[in-house]
Amino acid sequence: MAKSRLEETYRNELRPELVKSLDIKNIMDAPKIEKIVLNIGVKDAVGDSRILQKVMNIFDQVAGQKSVRTIAKKSIAGFKIREGMPLGTKVTLRRTNMYEFLDRLINLALPNMRDFQGVSTKLDGRGNYNLGIKDWIIFPELDYGALDKTYGMNITIHTSTSDDKEAYELIKSFGMPFKKQTK
């Protein structure tokens, strides 16, 4: 199987640089991205389950692989949600699909955002990065006429390190356009 451009760059250039800059003794201890999880919640699916199927079909184009439905774990009467009701979709990307998606996200999708100033530099305290996108139209592979409504999505980048500093340096080395930090 052919490796993606970003994966080759990581193995040949970024990982040796990270080992030097983070003062890591063994190259196998260098931080790496383990998986990327994409998630969309579709509140309109409560009234019409066909909407969720349309969203899943379009979401599969963005992710590059088949997504799975997520279901409600508890009933919430105020929102008319019952336990077991399908409410969204998610997909977990690994290996080549993960690097290809990250490449498209950093180099094509994020620069397409209106008034883009950079993404937040905040990590979750365990070396993982969460990015919320308000409008999925920023992805170039989507057909704008396919859905009447646009949805947001959550992108979680899981790294092999639990240190936020190392994870930040890893994600920054891939070219993630973080906001400029002012101190």
Image (cartoon, grey):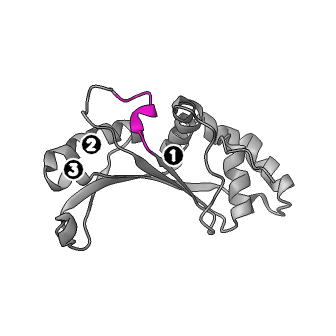
Q: Secondary structure at mark 2?
A: helix
Left or right for 143, reference 102? left
Task: Name the residue beneath numbered marker 3.
Answer: 44
Identify the mark nearer the N-term, 1 or 2.
Answer: 2
Figure quadrant of the C terminus: bottom right
Residue 127 in the image: state x and y as whole percent.
63, 64
Foreground mark, 1 or 3?
A: 3
Type of amino acid at the residue the image marks with label 1: Met
Q: Nearer the viewer, residue 162 or 111?
A: 111
Type of amino acid at the residue the image marks with label 2: Val
Q: Residue at x 27, y 25 (%)?
A: 145
Residue 92 in the image: state x and y as whole percent.
42, 54
Identify the mark nearer the N-term, 1 or 3.
Answer: 3
Q: Residues within 10 Å of mark 2 (few under 14, many from 20)?
A: many
Left or right for 14, reference 45? right
Q: Quadrant of residue 19?
A: bottom right
Residue 14 in the image: state x and y as whole percent.
74, 45
Distance from the alpha carbon under mark 1 to that under mark 3: 28 Å
Q: Residue at x 32, y 45 (%)?
A: 66
Left or right for 42, reference 132? left
Task: Please tell me how many numbered marks the rendered image carries.
Answer: 3
Residue 134 in the image: state x and y as whole percent.
43, 44
Distance from the alpha carbon under mark 1 to that under mark 2: 20 Å
Type of amino acid at the residue the image marks with label 3: Asp
Q: Residue at x 26, y 29 (%)?
A: 146
Q: Secondary structure at mark 1?
A: helix
Q: Which mark is residue 37?
A: none
Q: Secondary structure at mark 3?
A: helix
Task: Name the residue beneath numbered marker 2.
Answer: 55
The residue stretch that appears in magenta: 134-142
Q: Can residue 83 be seen in this snapshot?
A: no
